[in-house]
Image (cartoon, rainbow, N blue to C red):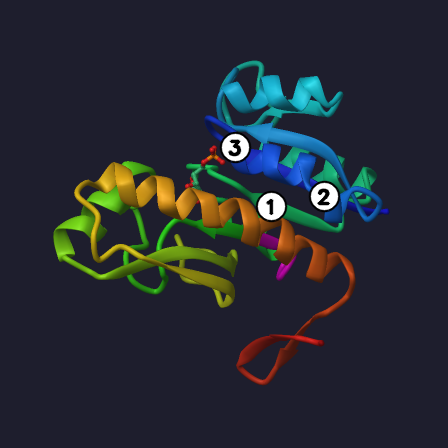
C-alpha cells in the first residue's frame, strides 16, 4: 500500500474525500493526520476511520515538526498531503521531504495564492476581480506559500455567480474530485518530472 499523511486545520472535507474515494481503497492508506490545532473537525473524521491524529507545532502538548519528521519516516510515509493546513511548513521539513509534499489550493495558481490567501479570502479576491473562471490547483510544496510547481488543475465557470460563497461551493466540488485523482496517479507511479514541467504517464 502507498502510505500518506494528511495535514489539516479545520473542516476536513478533502480528507474525507480521500478516505472515501473508491479509487484509493486498495491503493492508498492514510496512516496519520496532523493538525496545527489541538482539536478540529477533521480530527473527528480521522478518528471515525481509526486514523491516528497528532497536533503539530511548537505549543505545549504538540509534537514538533522535527519529531513529526522522525514519525513520518518510521511510518514509511510516501506522500504528505496538505488539505487545508494553514501554517507554513518549515524550510528544513520541506527539504527533508522534497517533492513529497503536495497542497490543494482553491483557485487557479499562480493567481490568488500566497500568504493570507486561504478559505473565503481566496474566493472573495476571485469574486472581486470579476474573473470568469476559477478552480482548484494541486502543487508541490516548496518553501513559500503556493509557489511550487503545479501538478493538476481543474477550472470551473463562475461567470454567473453572485457571491464568493457560490464560488467556494463550486470549487470545493472539484477539489473533492482532483485530490483523490492526483493521489491515485502519484501512488501508481505516473507522475514524473520532465525538465521544468510535471507530467503524468498515460
Ligand atoms: C480547501 O478549500 C482547500 O483547497 C484549502 O483549504 C480548504 C480546506 O477545506 N487549502 P477542507 O478542510 O478540506 O474542507
Q: Residue at x 46, y 44 (%)?
A: 173
Cα–Cα span, label 1 and label 2: 7 Å
Residue placed at 51% from the left, 50% from the top? 103
Question: Which residue in the protein does label 3 denote?
Answer: 13
Decide whether residue 99 is among the magenta residues.
Answer: yes
Main secondary-structure element of the magenta-colored stretch: loop
Left or right relative to 70: residue 90: left
- Cα gap from disc 3 to disc 2, whole angstroms: 16 Å
Give residue 55's position: percent from left, percent from top.
58, 23
The residue beneath circle 1 is 81
* Mark 1 or 2, nearer chain start: 2
The span picked out in magenta is 97-102
Q: Is residue 69 left or right of residue 147?
A: right
What quarter of the picture does the C terminus occupy?
bottom right
Note whether ligand 1 is within 8 Å of mark 2: no
**Residue 113 percent across, percent down from the top left:** 32, 54
In the rendered image, residue 170, in percent from the top left (x then y), is placed at 37, 46
Compared to residue 85, the image places residue 184 above or below, namely below
| Label 1 packing within 10 angstroms: few (<14), some (14-19), many (20+) | many
Eye-nearest disc, 3 or 2: 3
Is 139 in front, or is 55? 139
Q: Are marks 3 and 1 in contact (CB under 8 Å)?
A: no
Determine whether the residue tagged by mark 1 lies in a helix, strand or loop. Answer: strand
Label 3 residue near ligand 1, CB within 8 Å: yes
- Of residue 181 and residue 65, the one placed in the foreground of this image is 181
Amino acid at each position: 500500500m502507498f502510505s500518506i499523511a494528511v495535514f489539516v486545520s479545520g473542516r476536513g472535507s478533502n480528507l474525507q474525500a480521500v478516505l472515501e474515494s473508491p479509487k484509493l481503497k486498495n491503493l492508498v492508506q492514510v496512516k496519520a493526520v496532523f493538525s496545527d490545532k489541538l482539536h478540529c473537525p477533521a480530527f473527528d473524521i480521522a478518528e471515525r476511520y481509526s486514523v491516528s491524529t497528532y497536533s503539530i507545532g511548537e505549543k505545549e502538548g504538540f509534537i514538533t515538526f522535527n519529531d513529526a519528521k522522525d514519525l513520518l519516516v518510521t511510518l514509511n510515509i510516501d506522500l504528505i498531503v496538505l488539505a487545508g493546513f494553514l501554517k507554513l511548513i518549515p524550510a528544513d521539513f520541506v527539504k527533508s521531504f522534497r517533492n513529497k509534499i503536495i497542497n490543494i489550493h482553491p483557485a487557479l495558481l499562480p493567481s490568488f495564492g500566497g500568504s493570507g490567501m486561504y478559505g473565503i479570502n481566496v474566493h472573495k479576491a476571485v469574486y472581486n476581480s470579476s474573473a470568469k473562471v476559477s478552480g482548484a490547483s494541486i502543487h508541490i510544496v516548496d518553501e513559500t506559500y503556493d509557489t511550487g510547481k503545479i501538478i493538476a488543475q481543474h477550472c470551473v465557470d463562475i461567470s454567473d455567480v453572485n457571491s464568493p460563497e457560490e464560488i467556494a461551493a463550486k470549487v470545493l466540488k472539484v477539489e473533492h474530485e482532483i485530490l483523490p485523482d492526483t493521489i491515485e496517479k502519484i501512488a501508481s507511479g505516473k507522475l514524473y518530472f520532465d525538465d521544468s514541467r510535471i507530467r503524468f504517464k498515460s
